[in-house]
Amino acid sequence: MLGIFSFYENENPGLTNEDFKPHSSNEAKMVWDLYEKGIIREIFFGQEEHNAHIIMECENKEVSQNILADLPLVKNKLIEFELTTLVAYTGFSRLFLKS
């Protein structure tokens, strides 16, 4: 069974747009490829901070972390990701409990 993992991007401090330019095209190609393969299931930008939020489906946590570690922006220490392992929501059951 595959796991679902959520990653939140953190840009490392003190960087400018110029720091990202040499890697942006390769980053975009790799992320698109992961999306096309169904590994990245969803990707969003946070409206307030404009940081990427990625939902991935992988064999396990380590595989998902290794995939993101290969991205050019991560390899070049421009960004890091915080991981959350997601599980199915079970909160509906309490809505149906009898009082």
Image (tube, rainbow, N blue to C red):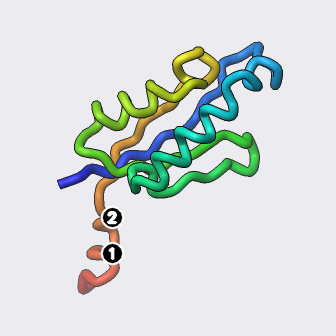
Q: Amino acid at mark 1?
A: Phe
How would you rate the neighbour count of disc 2 (Cα within 10 Å): few for under 14, some for 14-19, many for 20 or more?
few
- State if disc 1 and disc 2 touch (CB < 8 Å): yes
Q: Position of residue 8 (x, y in %)?
A: 54, 39
User: Label 1 belongs to which residue?
Assistant: 92
Compared with residue 5, is residue 64 higher up or lower down, i.e. above or below? above
Q: Position of residue 57 (x, y in %)?
A: 34, 51
How many numbered marks are there? 2
Q: Is residue 17 left or right of residue 2?
A: right
Q: Is residue 28 left or right of residue 60?
A: right
The kind of secondary structure element at disc 1 is helix
For the point 71% across and 16% down, which residue is it? 13
- Left/right placement of residue 65 relative to residue 26 reads left
State the residue at coordinates (60%, 34%): 27
**Residue density around tag 1, few if under 14, some if 14–19, many if 20 or more, within 10 Å:** few
Residue lying furthest left: 1
| Horizontal relation, residue 78 to residue 66: left or right | right
The residue identified by callout 2 is 89
Vertical placement of residue 56 versus 18, above or below: below
Which residue is at a point 30% across and 55% down the rendered structure image?
87
